[in-house]
Amino acid sequence: MPKVLIVEDDDVIAAGISRHLEGAGYSPIWVADGKQALARFRFEQPDVCVLDLMLPGLDGWAFIEKARAEGIGTPIIVVSARGTEHDRVHALEIGADDYLVKPFSMRSSSRASRPPRGAAPGRRRCSAATRSSSRSCGSTPERCRRTWTARARS
């Protein structure tokens, strides 16, 4: 069962995300503190991380920077109330893979039966280094378009 690390200090939001992911066939791991979350991120090696930016202990920005500096390529999806274009672009530039602004709705999907993104042989994960170059990062075309469109606006 794919593991999802949820880094969120709001109990209601974390519980909702956890329930939704369990129902979709994922194994959620919830942590409310940034420092503890980074330790669990290293130890648990989840398939994906859902990360709030405003956290006690270590904020989401520092979490992303530390994880990427350590060479951890696990996809990080930022879920934050901070919805300015600058925040979204900055998160992508420092290594986040996607950005979702709160509040948001959760819908059912058939994706639980699909292999985790990046599981195909020879497929590279998107990184800040490849995003800033003209080379292809091996990401999906949809995400590359979103990333490059967001960068062009800044």
Image: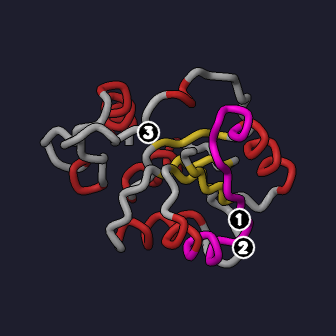
- Tell me residue 122's x, y (percent): 19, 43
Residue drawn at point x = 41 percent, y = 49 percent: 92
First in sequence: mark 2 or mark 1?
A: 1
Q: Find residue 51 and report its image quarter.
A: bottom right
Can you say whether 70 is above or below 101 in the image? below
Q: Find residue 7 and report its image quarter.
A: bottom right
The C terminus lies in quadrant: top left
Query: Please, which residue is most extreme toward the left here?
Result: 135
First in sequence: mark 3 or mark 1?
A: 1
How packed mark 1 is, by other alpha carbons closer than 10 Å (few <14, some 14-19, many 20 or more), is: many
Element on which disc 3 rests: loop
Task: List the residue tagged with mark 3.
Answer: 116
Marking on residue 43: none
Residue drawn at point x = 17 percent, y = 38 percent: 136
Q: Which residues are magenta?
A: 21-39
Can you say whether 45 is above or below 28 in the image? below
Task: List the residue tagged with mark 1.
Answer: 31
Is residue 28 one of those drawn in magenta? yes
Identify which amino acid the numbered label 3 is placed on: Pro
Identify which amino acid the numbered label 1 is placed on: Val
Can you say whether 31 is above or below 14 in the image? below
Element on which disc 2 rests: loop
| In this view, the mark in front (2 or 1) | 1
- Tell me residue 36's x, y (percent): 65, 76
Identify which amino acid the numbered label 2 is placed on: Pro
Residue drawn at point x = 77 percent, y = 51 percent: 14
Real-space Cα separation, disc 3 to disc 1, in angstroms: 22 Å
The N terminus lies in quadrant: top right
Q: How many marks?
A: 3
- Tell me residue 76's x, y (percent): 49, 52
Real-space Cα separation, disc 2 to disc 1, in angstroms: 11 Å
